Amino acid sequence: YGAAHNEASIVQVGYDNEAATKQVGTKNVTKTWLGFRRTSASDNDAWVTQRGYDNFSKVKQFGDVHVASVTQEGAHNIATVKASGYLGSAVIVQEGAKNEANVTQSGDRNGASVVQTGYFNNADIDQGGHDNVAAIGQNGYSHDADILQNGNDGTAYITQYCDNNTAFINQWAGTGNVASIMQTDYFNDAGINQSGYMNTAVIAQGSNHGAY
């Protein structure tokens, strides 16, 4: 009811995996793998909800005990989650049009979230270490944000308001590093690189701090 020309596929190889897809709209596509061919996966959950037009979602869980949730409302949004480690959590929420979000988790016990409200935003989170937390929030137009976590016990946050902001956080190695970037104006660029132990870095750009 209320849907036309949508495509959905679920592949499950292993045991105790759960997956569900809900599509409302037209020309939405979702592809979900919990294990694949000779790669068995267990105790994974994958939930996808699409409302709108021409949204695309892809979830691949090749490890064990992962949780992935993708919610898309709008048009022409792209979301991908790939988890191959253990005990990962990934959440992507997109409201608007032509947003893209990608989460890759190859380490263990990582948590990632991306929330995009607006248009033409891009967000990437890559977690190769263990016990990391990463979050990207984008509100507006044409933001770009990237987080890489190859260390352990790291925390990284990027928040972008207004339009046309660019930010990256690279936690190359080490343990217990914390990084945060807040951009509340237009056309800002910011970057943080960390590779030691228990470092903290904070960048705030813009006069519109009431957007916190």
Image (cartoon, helix red, strand yellow):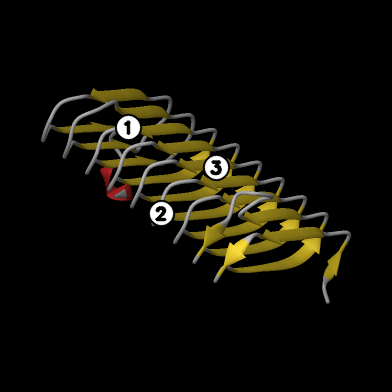
Q: Front-most of 27 and 125?
A: 125
User: Type of residue at label 3?
Assistant: Ala
N-terminal of the pair, mark 3 or mark 1, is 3
The residue drawn where x is 26% and y is 34% is 151
Dot label at residue 88: 2
In the displayed structure, does residue 165 sit left or right of residue 70? left
N-terminal of the pair, mark 2 or mark 1, is 2
The residue drawn where x is 12% and y is 32% is 199
Farthest-out residue, left:
198
Quarter of the picture holding the N terminus: bottom right
Residue 148 position within the rendered picture, expressed as x and y whole percent measured from the top left: 37, 32
Label pair 3/2, CB-CB below 8 angstroms: no
Residue 132 position within the rendered picture, expressed as x and y whole percent measured from the top left: 29, 45
The residue drawn where x is 70% and y is 63% is 51
| Distance of label 3 from label 1 (alpha carbons) | 19 Å
Label pair 2/1, CB-CB below 8 angstroms: no
Q: Front-most of 137 and 68?
A: 68
Q: Which structural element holds mark 2?
A: loop
User: Type of residue at label 1?
Assistant: Asn
> Label 3: which residue?
101
**Closer to the observer: label 3 or label 2?**
2
